[in-house]
């Protein structure tokens, strides 16, 4: 049995690699569409609830988008404002720390030459002057990247609107591309995949909010600056399993160490360890695990494969993709064998709301 699962995973991994290579020329479009699909999975319950209460399709979609913009815009505005207010305090702490770092470099175990340490800022300035042309070209490249990102955001919003507004009919169209005798099984697999994706996204959001609140309380008690940006960073880290929380937590520990010394860093580290244990033993099993059933080995391999193939974005979507493939495969395996359908009958319900 274990060997069967191993072969299945290898076949799926190989197929995924081939598909990724074939679709690599339109990588940016795929990223935008997948991101819009993930956001749709998060927001669609709002649209569905409004429609079940008699709200029209267009009004429900508009209300959902306005709700999302207000929530996300409010969070980002608060984080940016707090970050601007707190950054000078962090700068003051860093300036106070620099003499101690110089003293440690000169008199500590490294015994760095005093002249080299004192002239470090001049060396950095000279290097910047020498590479001004490359910095300018990097700025141009950054400008092009900003334009590309803005275009992607516009395309993503367009896809998001149509998925919220017309998602059911889009899915029905896709189901009708299959032979009539297979449509019931494809529809059942699609429902299982969508349920898994929606539950994974909502469960991970709950875990992310928990991480952000815990680290925000700890940083506030210690008087560490940049509480809001660090809390948001730690919360976003929850969407990259295993490594995301570690990297984001390391940044929080570093900032706490800069402002409160090794004691502050140790306190934040202990808080993060306890926080991760609560996630591992309570949140993941009861909030995410009961909807997403994948082996830890598959999680690690999927995360590594996604990161190697698609970078950070691949690491974000690797685990939900593996969970969706698993759910779809289970649904197909448990569906009854297709029976012959009468002429003209299809395995998909008619559109109740044309």
Image (spheres, helix red, strand yellow):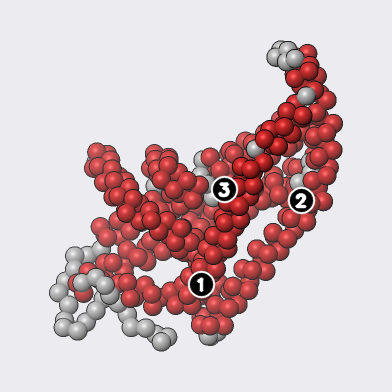
Contact between marks 3 and 1 (CB within 8 A): the answer is no
Is residue 286 among what the camera can see? no
Contact between marks 2 and 1 (CB within 8 A): the answer is no
State the residue position of label 3. Answer: 238
Q: What residue lies at 42% left-to-right and 42% top-to-bottom? A: 308
Q: Residues within 10 Å of mark 2 (few under 14, many from 20)?
A: some
Q: What residue lies at 33% left-to-right and 83% top-to-bottom? A: 350
- Measured in 3D between alpha carbons, the distance from the residue under mark 3 to the one under mark 2, in whole angstroms, is 21 Å
Question: Upstream in the sequence, badge 2 or badge 1?
Answer: 2
Residue 270 horizontal side relative to residue 38, left or right? right
Residue 84 horizontal side relative to residue 181, left or right? right
| Number of the front mark, 3 or 1 | 1
State the residue position of label 2. Answer: 83
Q: What residue lies at 26% left-to-right and 72% top-to-bottom? A: 177
Q: Residues within 10 Å of mark 3 (few under 14, many from 20)?
A: many
SS class of the residue under badge 1? helix
- Measured in 3D between alpha carbons, the distance from the residue under mark 2 to the one under mark 1, in whole angstroms, is 31 Å
Look at the picture and state if 279 lies above or below 165: above
State the residue position of label 1. Answer: 158
Contact between marks 3 and 2 (CB within 8 A): the answer is no
Q: Where's residue 251, x and y in %?
A: 66, 38
Of 144 and 152, which appears nearest the observer? 144
Is residue 155 among what the camera can see? yes
Q: Where's residue 142, x and y in %?
A: 60, 52
Look at the picture and state if 59 lies above or below 27: below
Question: Upstream in the sequence, badge 3 or badge 2?
Answer: 2
| Number of the front mark, 3 or 2 | 2
SS class of the residue under badge 3? loop
- Measured in 3D between alpha carbons, the distance from the residue under mark 3 to the one under mark 1, in whole angstroms, is 27 Å
SS class of the residue under badge 2? helix
Q: What residue lies at 63% left-to-right and 71% top-to-bottom? A: 67
Residue 294 horizontal side relative to residue 120, left or right? left
């Amino acid at each position: 049995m274990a060997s069967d699962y191993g072969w299945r995973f290898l076949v799926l991994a190989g197929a995924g690699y081939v598909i990724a290579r074939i679709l690599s020329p339109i990588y940016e479009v795929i990223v935008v569409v997948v991101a819009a699909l993930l956001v749709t999975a998060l927001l669609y319950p709002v649209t569905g609830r409004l429609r079940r209460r008699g709200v029209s399709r267009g009004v429900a979609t508009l209300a959902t988008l306005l709700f999302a913009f207000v929530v996300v815009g409010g969070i980002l505005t608060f984080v940016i404002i707090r970050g601007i207010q707190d950054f000078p305090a962090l700068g003051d702490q860093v300036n106070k720390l620099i003499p101690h770092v110089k003293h440690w470099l000169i008199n500590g175990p490294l015994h760095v030459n005093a002249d080299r340490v004192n002239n470090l800022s001049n060396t950095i300035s000279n290097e910047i002057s020498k590479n001004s042309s490359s910095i300018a070209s990097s700025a141009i490249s950054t400008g092009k990247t900003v334009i590309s990102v803005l275009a992607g955001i516009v395309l993503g919003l367009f896809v998001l609107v149509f998925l919220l507004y017309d998602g059911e009919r889009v899915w029905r169209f896709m189901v009708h591309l299959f032979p009539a005798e297979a449509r019931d099984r494809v529809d059942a697999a699609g429902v299982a995949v969508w349920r898994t994706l929606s539950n994974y996204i909502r469960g991970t959001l709950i875990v992310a909010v928990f991480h952000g609140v815990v680290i925000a309380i700890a940083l506030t008690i210690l008087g560490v600056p940049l509480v809001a940006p660090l809390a948001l960073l730690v919360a976003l880290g929850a969407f990259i399993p295993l490594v995301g929380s570690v990297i984001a937590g390391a940044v929080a520990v570093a900032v706490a160490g800069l402002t409160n010394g090794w004691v502050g860093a140790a306190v934040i580290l202990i808080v993060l360890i306890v926080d991760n244990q609560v996630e591992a033993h309570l949140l993941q099993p009861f909030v995410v695990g009961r909807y997403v059933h994948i082996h830890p080995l598959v999680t690690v391999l999927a995360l590594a494969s996604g990161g190697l193939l698609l970078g950070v974005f691949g690491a974000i979507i690797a685990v939900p993709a593996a969970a969706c493939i698993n759910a779809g495969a289970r649904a197909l395996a448990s569906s009854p064998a297709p029976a012959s359908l009468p002429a003209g009958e299809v395995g998909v319900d008619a559109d109740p709301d044309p």
